[in-house]
Amino acid sequence: MSASPSSSSSTPSGTCTAPSWSATTAYATTGTQASWRGHNYTNKWWTTGEDPTIIGAWGVRNDLGVC
């Protein structure tokens, strides 16, 4: 039996419509959406350079879920 290459990936099947997060962009307006690694996020306050995947009580972003 020969194995065929898998066409699946770890990326969600949906489409992220928010702009891709950038470490050099200043997110000055609370609630600005950004997508990163298959999720959409909004910022809680002014931020720049903070990885959106670090969330929680003191994290700068809210995870809006898979996109």
Image (cartoon, rainbow, N blue to C red):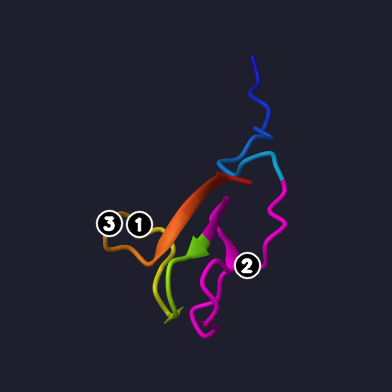
**Residue drawn 27% across and 63% down?**
58
Magenta span includes 33: yes
* In the image, residue 56 above or below residue 51: above
Image location of residue 5, percent across then percent down: 66, 33
Which class describes the residues within 10 Å of circle 2: few (<14), some (14-19), or many (20+)?
A: some
User: Mark on residue 26?
Assistant: none
Q: Is residue 4 left or right of residue 56?
A: right
**Cα separation between marks 1 and 3:** 7 Å
Q: Is residue 17 left or right of residue 41?
A: right
**2 or 3: tag closer to the N-terminus:** 2
Dot 1 amino acid type: Ile
Dot 2 amino acid type: Ser
**Residue topped by disc 3:** 57
**Residue drawn 63% across and 67% down?**
20
Dot 3 amino acid type: Ala
Image location of residue 33, percent across then percent down: 60, 64
**Residue topped by disc 1:** 55
Region of the chain picked out in magenta, as a range? 15-41
**Residue drawn 65% across and 21% down?**
2
